[in-house]
Image: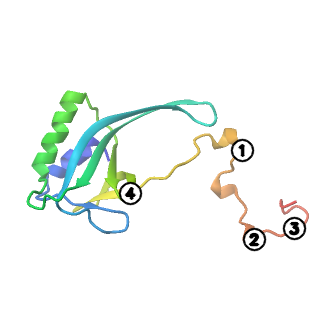
Amino acid sequence: MTLHQIKEHLTSLKEIGFKLPDGSLVPAHFHVTEVGKVVKDFIDCGGTVRHETVANFQLWNADDYDHRLHPEKLLNIIELSEKILGLEDLEIEVEYQGDTIGKYGLDFDGKHFLLNNKQTDCLAKDQCGVPEKDTMIPIANMSCTPGSGCC
């Protein structure tokens, strides 16, 4: 989800809810403690230089049960961040505290913002010799006969 998309959703909501991948909701008294721009320049294992930029939201649970973040307030925070930080229409990555700080993608189901698990991946499989998943032969189906590929 991009900044433009979340702003559109916020204009139609009366309250904000974030749902974790396990289906549980982030407590309603959460705060958005940061809206920022994260720039990552790196070299993948194949030697390709890469550049990623995302908008980052950090959710935090406080012991402040009397306040709730309303859609118009989050919209104002996003718009101020766009203006001050020069944010473009970037993809959003959400940080949320579990056992450690988790990073999530963001989606929307019409009622709640969905925190989606993110996974690591090799970005240079063709250069590292890592076969694509659909080309791998399942071990359970392998037999060591001539031409089976196991020997």
Q: Residue at x 75, y 71 (%)?
A: 141
Report how far apart the C-alphas of labels 4 and 2 lie in the structure.
33 Å
Colour scheme employed for the rendering of this structure: rainbow
Question: Residue farthest to the front?
Answer: 63
Q: Are marks 3 and 4 in contact (CB under 8 Å)?
A: no
- Local SS, label 1: loop
Mark linked to residue 129:
1
| Mark closer to the observer (1, 2) | 1
What amino acid type is highlighted by mark number 1?
A: Gly
What amino acid is at disc 3? Cys
Q: CA distance from mark 3 to mark 2?
A: 10 Å
- Seen at 16% across and 34% down, the residue is 80
Residue type at mark 4 is Asn
Which badge, 1 or 4, is on the more N-terminal residue?
4
The answer to whether 53 is drawn above or below residue 65 in the figure is above
Mark 2 or mark 1, which is nearer the start of the sequence?
1
Q: For the view shown, which residue lies furthest in the left direction?
A: 66
Mark on residue 144? 3
Q: Characterize the local packing of mark 1: few (<14), some (14-19) or many (20 or more) Cα atoms within 10 angstroms.
A: few
- How far apart marks 1 and 2 lie (CA) works out to 22 Å
Query: Relative to residue 109, is residue 47 drawn left or right?
Result: right
- Residue position for label 2: 141
CA gap, disc 1 and disc 4: 29 Å
Sequence-earlier tag: 4 or 2: 4
Q: Which residue is mark 4?
A: 116
Identified by mark 2, the residue type is Asn
Mark 4: which secondary structure?
Answer: strand
Q: How many marks?
A: 4
Nearest to the eye among marks 3 and 4: give it. 4
In space, the residues marked 3 and 4 are separated at their CA atoms by 40 Å
